[in-house]
Amino acid sequence: MSTNGKMTRKKDLTFLQRIYIPEILKGLRLTIGQIFRPKITIQYPEVRFSPPASFRGRPILVEENGTERCVACGLCSRVCPALAIEVQADETTLEKERFPVKFEINMVRCIFCGFCEEVCPEEAIIMSKEYELVFESQEEAVFGKDRLLVPIDQVKERLDFLHKHR
Amino acid sequence: MEILISLIRICVVLGVVLLLVVVLVWSERRISAAIQNRIGPNRVGPNGILQPVADVLKLLMKEDIVPKNANRTIHDLAPIISIGVALSTFAVIPVGNTIELFGTTIKLQIADVNIGILYILALTSMGVYGVTLAGWSSNNKYSLLGGLRSSAQLISYELSMGLSIIGVLLVSGSLRLDEIVEHQGSYIWGWLPAWNMFLQPVAFITFVVAAFAETNRLPFDLPEAEPELVGGYHTEYSGLKFGLFMLSEYANIVTASAVIVTLFLGGYNVPFIEQAGLSAFTVSILQVGAFCFKVLCVLLFIILIRWTLPRFRYDQLMNLGWKVMLPITLANLLVTGFVIVAL
């Protein structure tokens, strides 16, 4: 844009630009400069990506004082859009009175939306940082309580993130 | 004896060209990755140098599919034409001056043809048959469009290519490639090598642009513009036949850069080497090395251009070919003619 009141349009090229070769050289300077910039590739099997706390990896159950926080209300199972969660409740003598006798997440169905984490009133099911999920069969992909329970001190970061941003 | 020497020359040059193709494919992938801040193939062999070999092995294992309504004979013939033309163009390129080996003088050029440049022009225009026939015989509209574009593009740019070569011919006064190279061994004003790049700068630029168009490289890769035409003329090719197309494409690039070096960058000449007082044998070896070095530099330039410029639109391509390149080359020819007559 010029200041003397006369509009110059972007598409009006100068003579040098119309010759095009100086512009090619400018472009070449840019691409050659890019060659020497640091690479962003992560060499996967040797180097692994460690995600930030906001990452939604596989959902896990929080284990506190040797038992799960879950009270088997079944909200996660209700909200799950992929119908991946199955909860079966039972009574317990503990203070929370109810506990899941069976808690299964079918990891083939899970879409990592995080709705279960959002809806959980006890903060018992949260998303972890784990993203390496490989199964050899459908049965192996159904995670029971044994594989879902994770001690609370291992998921502190995610809990802090949830407290801060939710 | 003569036949044996010729066979050895053919094998060596063919081997070097195929080796250069492997290096070209690898360096293209690594350099393009570097330009995009990636790493590129680095797993197969040291620094991934064996990646093209792995690619070829994969292509060999693949099934060869011919579409149901395709013309089978022509479909098979097209890649053969492409690769044959691409490799045989190299026959007239002088890789070096004569060399003394085991008491015999060997000329480092497979075929010493007295119409070398015409041979190159003729063969590169033959190459379009491979592409066009591949597009037509596939019975696929995308392939056909790719083949048609290719022929239109080649006709448009062959003209300015030929006209810019005529400038070189006027300067050196010969159609023989070895004489053109010899002519570039002298000096202007005693210090500047008389490379045609300096004598014919306009022809140099137009020839390089036309060479890009002839080899279907970006920014002129309309025959295979993948966002518009799926894959262009080789959409319906798979396995070894697809591999042959890829090979001929890269061999064409190597040949084109060798032609650029021969015609404009002084060929095998090393500036001021005659003043160094080296033995004839060392000079020959150095000249071959210089030729390879120059070819590699041109190849690097071609790769860098690919990742710098966007593709032309079809009408822009035709405008550039007929309204810009042709007048410029004609004017260059006129000026060159006047200057030569005046001198």
Image (tube, rainbow, N blue to C red):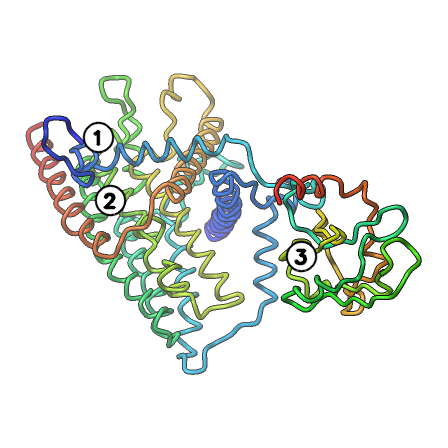
Q: Are marks 1 and 3 on the same chain?
A: no
Provide residue B327's location: percent of width, then percent of height.
12, 45
Query: Mark 2 or 1, which is nearer the eye?
Result: 1
Residue under mark 3: which chain is it in? A
Q: Secondary structure at mark 2?
A: loop
- In screen coordinates, is B156 left or right of B145? left
Which residue does the image show at 56% across and 44% down from the upper left? Answer: B40
- In-front residue for pair A101/B55: A101
Query: Mark 3 or 2, which is nearer the eye?
Result: 3
Q: Are marks 2 and 1 in contact (CB under 8 Å)?
A: no
- In-front residue for pair A120/B278: A120
Q: Amino acid at mark 1?
A: Leu
Query: On the image, numbered disc 2 is attached to which residue?
Result: B175
Query: On the image, numbered disc 1 is attached to which residue?
Result: B199
| Residue B1 seen by the camera | no
Query: On the image, numbered disc 3 is attached to which residue?
Result: A119
Q: Amino acid at mark 3?
A: Val
- In-front residue for pair B300/B18: B300
Residue under mark 2: which chain is it in? B
Q: Quadrant of residue A136?
A: bottom right
Query: Mark 1 or 3, which is nearer the eye?
Result: 3
Residue under mark 1: which chain is it in? B
Q: Earlier in the sequence, mark 2 or mark 1?
A: 2
Q: Are marks 3 and 2 on the same chain?
A: no
Provide residue B39's location: percent of width, then percent of height.
57, 40
